[in-house]
Image (spheres, rainbow, N blue to C red):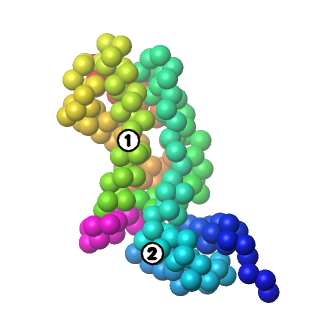
Amino acid sequence: MARPKSAQARSEALRAAADVVVDVGVRGFTVDEVVRRSGVAKSTIYRHWGSAQNLLFEAVEQLIVPEPEPDTGSLEGDLRAMGEFMMVITPELMTRSRRIFAGLLEGSIDDPAVAELFAKLREERRRPIGLILRRAAERGEIDACYGISPGLDMAVDVVVGPFFSRVLTSHESVSQRDMELWVSTVGRGLGA
């Protein structure tokens, strides 16, 4: 059997790596399992990524669905757009996200490199909310202290907390009613 071309091998290895992360988590991730699932030679994997950790990190980053950065002109509109994004996430995607989050959280306890990846991904997930809140503070919709740190960091926690609790820890989906209640609660809580 002919060896796959380099780009094809890279793609196949990355797809298999993502599957391994979803199936066995960060702590169970091995290059040997990626090799078994992809058929790509271990030497090819190391040539492309240099280490198992680099492959793991790229696989995790590939699995994270980017959040929108709405700019509707109002805090309420932006939050509603974010909420609607959360409402259309499929149960399969949510299960995958929970597994990735749990694996990264667990791995970050003992492994500084995983902790760094977890922090990077956490900040990337929080960035769109921070942007929404900074714009709302600039428009005078919320107290100015929520547009800059440390107030901004706390405000982001207030915004993401309900969804984090609902989706990641209680395994419940987000309904239209939940989203509307979230929008109004966050607005009132931040002084909109």
Label 1 sits on a secondary structure element that is helix
Q: Provide the residue span drawn in magenta.
A: 102-114
Question: Residue at the spot x=53%, y=84% of the render?
Answer: 32
**Marks 2 and 1, how far apart in space?**
28 Å
Depth-wise, is mark 2 or mark 1 nearer the camera? 2
Q: Is residue 172 toward the left or the right of residue 90 in the image?
A: left
Q: Which kind of residue does numbered mark 1 sit on?
A: Arg
The answer to whether 20 is drawn above or below residue 96 in the figure is: below
Query: What is the tally of numbered marks visible in this picture?
Result: 2
Q: Which residue is mark 1?
A: 126
Quarter of the figure with residue 105: bottom left
Quarter holding the C terminus is top left
Circle 1 Cα neighbour tier, 10 Å, few/some/many (<14 / 14–19 / ≥20): some
Q: Are marks 2 and 1 in contact (CB under 8 Å)?
A: no
Q: Which kind of residue does numbered mark 2 sit on?
A: Ser
Label the magenta part by its dominant secondary structure: helix
